[in-house]
Amino acid sequence: MSWHPAEQAVCEDIGSCDPVDLVIQPTVHDLGGFQVRRVLPVAKRRMVGPFIFFDHMGPAVLPPEQPINVRPHPHIGLSTLTWLFEGTIMHRDSLGFAQEITPGEVNWMTAGKGIVHSERTPERLMGQANPLSGLQVWMALPKAHEETDPSFQHYKADALPVVDGDGVRAVVVAGTAWGQTAPVSVFTETLYADVTLRAGATLTVGTEHEERAIYPLSGRLEIDGEAFDPGAMLALKPGLSVDVKAADTAHLVLIGGAAMDGPRHIWWNFVHSDKERIEQAKADWREGRFAKVPGDEEEFIPLPEDR
């Protein structure tokens, strides 16, 4: 790989031109029939841009007796996005939205000062085996927007910009990439793209975004002569343009954006810059002060410390 003068200066400043700054190995949890790989947060990298939580679900086939039943639970201080490769999840929230999450479509929920939602297998799919494979991410909100009003957006696959050519096909899921901007209303500079590469094709990850990371889902990747297999997140060094070559047909997601404006606290489903605000959210949930989810009012997930 050849370096431009500005990138060479970056290398000299940090003492290394290795484009992969950190390899993040996920922790694997078995949820009774399918695995979830939690990639973020980790001790060495709490966030990548606004991304503060990154889970890889499946792939799995859920048996008929094991539907998805995530009961109503609260969030503050973040936006959530579920990006499915297989399967269907019914989203309901306290704003009154009821929307199926399906592969290739964006459900974007902003919690802000508080929202409650549930995720379940749709009624029409109950009693049958159902596939499940996808990513769930949380994005921290900048301090100026942590207490924004909650909101929900849904976009069909054909509303998302696609960059296609030279063996590379990239769907811009949120934020901006390669001159394209997704319709989702983000609150800070964001990068989220789903990329497929033909064998031998090269994806160039430029320096438009301050922080960037690659999560390979399938296929072996080569970066600066080093091979990487699927399953670990590759946090890229800031300031360097990076060429990612597919040794064989590959599928990956690319995330990132501007560094967040200070650290964030995470407790259960709450994210905030102020610990006291999280304590208030805990009390509000315990005392029933969050709004109910229309159509899903009977159940809820209690605070972990109250179980």
Image (cartoon, grey):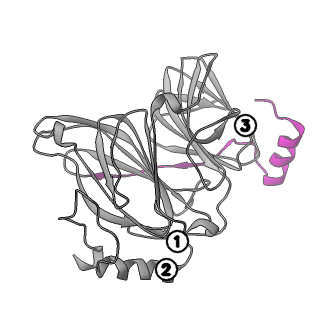
154 or 225, which lies in front?
Answer: 154
Depth check: give the residue in front, 81 or 35: 81
Residue at 54 percent of width and 32 percent of height: 160
With 172 as the anchor, is 269 left or right in this view? left
Query: What's the CA distance linking mark 1 and mark 3?
Result: 30 Å
Q: Are marks 1 and 3 in contact (CB under 8 Å)?
A: no
Query: What percent of the width, then of the height, locates residue 166?
Result: 64, 16
Q: Which residues are magenta?
A: 1-30
Q: Position of residue 206 (x, y in %)?
A: 72, 37
> Badges 2 and 1: C-beta atoms under 8 Å apart?
yes
Residue shown at the point (55%, 78%) measured from the top left: 274
Q: Identify the residue position indicated by label 1 in the image.
A: 272
Quickly name the residue at label 2. 277
Residue 27 highlighted magenta (yes or no): yes
- Specify the quadrant of the image occupied by residue 165: top right
From this view, report whether residue 15 is shown above or below residue 87.
Answer: below
* Image quarter (top left, top right, bottom left or bottom right) of the C terminus: bottom left
The x and y percentages for residue 84 are: 38, 38
Three-letter amino acid code at the position of disc 1: His
